[in-house]
Amino acid sequence: EAALVWVYHRSMNVANLPFFLVVNATAAGSTTTKASSLDSSHFPSDFMFGTASSAYQYEGGAREGGKGPSIWDTYTQTHPDLVEGRSNGNVAVDSYNRYQEDIKIMKTMGFNTYRFSIAWSRLLPNGKVSGGVNQQGVDYYNNLINSLLSNEWQLADSTGGDSGTEPYVTAHHQLLAHAAAVKLYRVNYKATQKGLIGITNVSYWFLPLSDSDEDKKAAQRALDFMYGWFMDPIVNGDYPDVMKTNIGSSRLPQFSAQQSDLLKGSFDFIGLNYYTASYASNHPQFDPQRPSMFSDRRLQLSAERNGVLLGPKVGSGWVYDYPRGFEQLLTYTKTKYKDPVIYITENEALLDVSRVSYFQGHLEAVHNAIKEGVKVKGFFAWSLLDNFEWSAGYSARFVAASPEELSAFKYPRQGNARLRRQYCRLRCIPFTLKAFFLFFSSWAELVKDRSNGDVAVDSYNRYLEDIEIMKTMGFNAYRFSFAWSRLLPTGKLSGGVNKQGVDYYNNLIDSLLSNGMQPFVTLFHWDTPQGLEDEYGGFLSSNIVEDFEDYAEVCFREFGDRVKHWITFNEPWTFSSGGYAGGPLRIAPFRCSHWQLDDSTGGDSGTEPYVTAHHQLLAHAAAVNLYRLKYQATQNGVIGISNVSHWFLPLSDSKEDEEAAQRAVEFMYGWFMDPIFHGDYPEIMKSYIGSRLPQFSSHQSDLLKGSFDFIGLNYYTASYASNHPQFDPQRPCMFSDRRLKLSDERNGVLIGPRVGSGWVYDYPRGFEQLLTYTKTRYNDPVIYITENGVYDSTDESSPKEEALQDVSRVSYFQGHLEAVHNAIKKGVKVQGYFAWSLLDNFEWSAGYSLRFGLVHIDFKNGLQRHPKLSAFWFQNFLRQNRPIENSLDLSSQNLQLMDSTY
């Protein structure tokens, strides 16, 4: 049975269009929560999903059907220069004439509720009952309501002045009008119509800019001046005390005892609109000659703290994607305001690509709040259509489907409308949110060829083909990484495990084993889930440790019966240097000090590399401890970490340069090796970096010591090091902290042949020296070479025939495998070797411009795989009783024959 619900809407900035008509009907059926991925089945069975609108922004028909003018009709006609594009809502998106079409779109998308507003001046053209009721307006809204119900829907619905008084006066009158309407409804209509009535308030969430008491009070004050201003009167019958103190009785109106009684409890539910969050700091300066509702707060708002944005900026305006604030605002409402029933009556972001991520994160925040006992009963997205966005005109788009796409009712915007359809139809196919290499899609100019890994080499769909290639070559193991966000799309266990991701890795692992290859699985290879990056800055926060441990447990539990070799982190040095210090290999999120690189995304090269490295080490220790306590005894596997290091030689025979070479090794290799062996950083790092280097507690140190069964070692090249004591304390950086310079030549002679066009020099002796150094320095550990390789110097313009004859790669592999062999003969416990890489692939900020593969990928022709000369060399080498030498015919004719018969 349908029931009418009247909802009072308070706009954030203006007193407009106050009434919303809502029809509430019980949702039929129930759903079962799926563990795989968040969808609408995770919400209560009577939960509402809808989209939201308002009359002036949507209807149009300004002079049709007997409608009288509203203040927005007058404002946009009188002051068109104050509206972006000099636009107005005379036509808007013409929902007055096209509401049937809009209903069809919403029904197709799967929404079961629609929140809209009634234009006061369409029903009462001059605003008063004495002026007469406009029957055409009544007919229009009756037709709209009946059309919604027939589709089995649930309905939910400057020019002068004084900024120091008028906001408070208009707000006061809105609250009194709200209380009067609620009383009227309850006395005359509620018993027979069986509806509910409430008010819709808006609030950001506010966090203190610092840990000071002043900023904490400022954050609470910001909340009281935005949210408490309208919540306190309807719950407690009066304004917040801080408002009464800061504003004073001369400017803040007072409620009479009768008005206060009418206001208390004047709601059956609370409508809550949430868009963004902000930092608040204390700002006691106040000019009594120029009072304003904003300066009355005695605070300043900011979107960033220490140069780091609160969340990704969505669009070009004021919205920052911070779903955690949404969850906190909901739980605050439960605690502060006596646990009311809540409907989310607006939530949305600008820009459709980011809108999908925004909705996902904010719906998860709602879901988390529900699990914490918050009585959220419905969610309304703003908005179904692009519409007239007040003073922004039509320049801001909060939409699931654009008017241009609606003319022939084509598909709404792909990512956005289809995502909502997945939620609303309760048959969502679990999907993997992109990990934070979405960064590289948003910052395409930071990738050399403006490419991304959306498709990469399509191993997700072609892994069986790739396994067949490896089997043909004779490999007996394959090292690959899990995508954290393929298994936990939000990065958190609370967001659900993606069953499709589990199935994919199960199929990959089973296929490897059935083809005689052992899986070596890396848990983290630089692809932080975007949700964690948004929520707390990823590895900049210690929160990552617990979330990584949860993720690791999912992996151990789901795959540990077959995976016997686990690697927690790949090259934490590269992730920290390239991601947070402007290193030579740019890694998302590519942060560094502004003085270092103009195109970075912000950061501090003197602290953030050390912080992120610290948290990687703690997360590694936590995962190892978990594996050893719960899984290792029954699964019989081993676990370790993969570190990278070059080898460094002194540029001269001087003592200073010899110390510089050792210092270079300590700052690259010892940084991550010393903690897992000795429980602390190298002494030279502690001495040079000082307070900027985080410290381990005694418990953390104990967890780190011995937290490995083997060491993964990645080696590519070597350098000369010379002493360089100059250091600018005003511009600290992890590279200048070393007090040295690196060079690839000495006395005009290169350290080794330059391979490709970049940073790799073929110096296998350095590989052997690094291995023997590891044996001596770090108590003779078991070692797996988890990466070793080189990239091609050819590009897309080079003939494929030339690209396939990678003679320099063959020479590189031959020399470096000889180095490994020599180290083994010296007693180094090397037990495995993994070439980087099987296929040409997406090489981070270099895009597809660097080719490390044994197999050439034709990116212009369906990602066809063509084995290079090095693939045949490895096939020949891996046959038993073959010497480590190249006995292959390198002629192009023979190479073509081998390719065709591979």
Image (cartoon, rainbow, N blue to C red):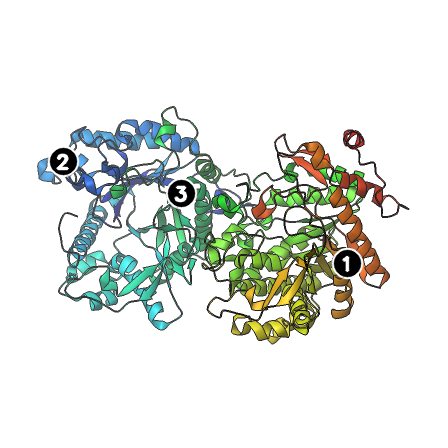
Comparing 864 with 565, the one in front is: 864
Q: What element carries label 3?
A: strand
Identify the residue under disc 3. Answer: 48
User: Given the current orientation, which residue lies at the most extreme top position?
Assistant: 408
User: Which numbered marker is on residue 765?
Assistant: 1
On the rendered image, what quadrant is the N terminus found in?
top left
Q: Nearer the viewer, residue 869 or 794?
A: 794
Is residue 765 toward the left or the right of residue 235 in the image?
A: right
Choose mark 2 or mark 3, whichever is in front.
Answer: 2
Question: Based on the displayed image, in which of its 4 quarters is residue 841 positioned?
Answer: top right
Amino acid type, callout 2? Pro
Among numbered discs 3 and 1, the one appearing first in the sequence: 3
> What's the mark number on residue 125?
2
Callout 1, which amino acid? Arg
Q: Which structural element holds mark 1?
A: helix
Residue 250 appears left or right of 547: left
Q: Give the Cα distance between marks 3 and 1.
A: 67 Å
Please rate how many residues cluster around mark 3, counting C-alpha atoms within 10 Å: few if below 14, some from 14 to 19, many from 20: many
Is residue 79 in view from this perspective?
yes
Residue 824: quadrant of the picture = bottom right
Which residue: 64% across, 72% down? 682
Mark 1 or mark 2, earlier in chain: 2
The answer to whether 88 is drawn above or below residue 536 in the figure is above
One can see residue 645 in this view? no
Disc 3 marks a residue whose amino acid type is Met
